[in-house]
């Protein structure tokens, strides 16, 4: 799937496909994550741009970061830090490659992405995959 198509699959419109790394709609925020920058912690995927991303000198002043900062702030303020995610397979700064929207069904059922750290001044952030507990309380 192509980058814009992956966002559209989740109901988002990417305004500037060659510059934007995130998108918003009335009821949500969607960010793109590079597959090569993902790690695993406690058996679940996570990304921390301070740890996994290229040096901030390579991306900190780009318009995509400026817009993503605004989107991450809104996600924290309005949606408790929950975001939709598009996972991109390409090479940062070169090509998006293919993109896959994170759809919480089948093997991904009961999961969502959560912002756990955010530095508004730089745009550094951490987002983690959360697995919701499926246990049913007994009476």
Image (cartoon, rainbow, N blue to C red):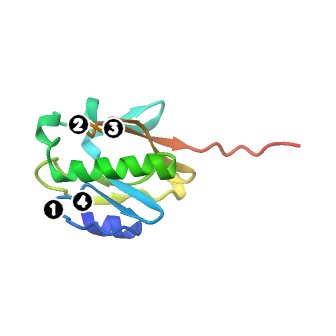
Residue 81, percent from left and from top: 47, 45
In the image, residue 99 sits, relative to residue 39, either above or below, namely below
- Please give the label number shown on residue 53: 2
In primary-sequence order, the first of circles 4 and 1 is: 1
Q: Distance of mark 1 from mark 2, alpha carbons?
A: 19 Å
Q: Distance of mark 4 from mark 2, alpha carbons?
A: 18 Å
Q: Distance of mark 3 from mark 4, alpha carbons?
A: 23 Å
- Residue at (23, 49) in percent of width and height: 66
In primary-sequence order, the first of circles 2 and 3 is: 2
Specify whether residue 89 is in view.
Answer: no
In primary-sequence order, the first of circles 3 and 1 is: 1
Q: Secondary structure at mark 3?
A: strand
Taking depth in this image into account, of 5 and 23 the one nearest to the observer is 23
The image quarter in which residue 3 lies:
bottom left
Label 3 belongs to which residue?
A: 125
In primary-sequence order, the first of circles 3 and 4 is: 4
Taking depth in this image into account, of 30 and 122 the one nearest to the observer is 122
Q: Secondary structure at mark 4?
A: loop
In front: mark 2 or mark 3? Answer: 3
In primary-sequence order, the first of circles 4 and 2 is: 2
Indicate the quadrant containing the N terminus: top left, top right, bottom left or bottom right: bottom left
In front: mark 4 or mark 1? Answer: 1
Taking depth in this image into account, of 44 and 58 the one nearest to the observer is 58
Are there few (<14), some (14-19), or many (20+) residues within 10 Å of tag 3?
some
Residue 62, percent from left and from top: 15, 48
Label 4 belongs to which residue?
A: 98
| For the residues bearing labels 3 and 4, Cβ distance under 8 angstroms | no
Count the labels in the image. Answer: 4
Q: Secondary structure at mark 1?
A: loop
- Please give the label number shown on residue 18: 1
In the image, residue 81 sits, relative to residue 20, either above or below, namely above
């Amino acid at each position: 799937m192509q980058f814009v198509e992956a966002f559209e699959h989740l109901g988002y419109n990417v305004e500037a496909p060659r510059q934007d790394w995130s998108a918003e709609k009335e009821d949500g925020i969607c960010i793109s994550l590079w597959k090569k920058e993902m790690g695993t912690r406690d058996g679940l995927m996570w990304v921390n741009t301070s740890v996994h991303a290229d040096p901030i000198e390579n991306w900190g002043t780009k318009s995509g970061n400026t817009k993503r900062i605004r989107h991450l702030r809104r996600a924290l303020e309005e949606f408790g830090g929950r975001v939709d995610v598009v996972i991109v397979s390409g090479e940062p700064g070169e090509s998006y490659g293919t993109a896959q929207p994170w759809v919480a069904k089948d093997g991904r059922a009961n999961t969502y992405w959560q912002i756990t750290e955010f530095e508004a001044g730089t745009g550094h952030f951490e987002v983690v995959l959360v697995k919701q507990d499926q246990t049913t309380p007994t009476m």
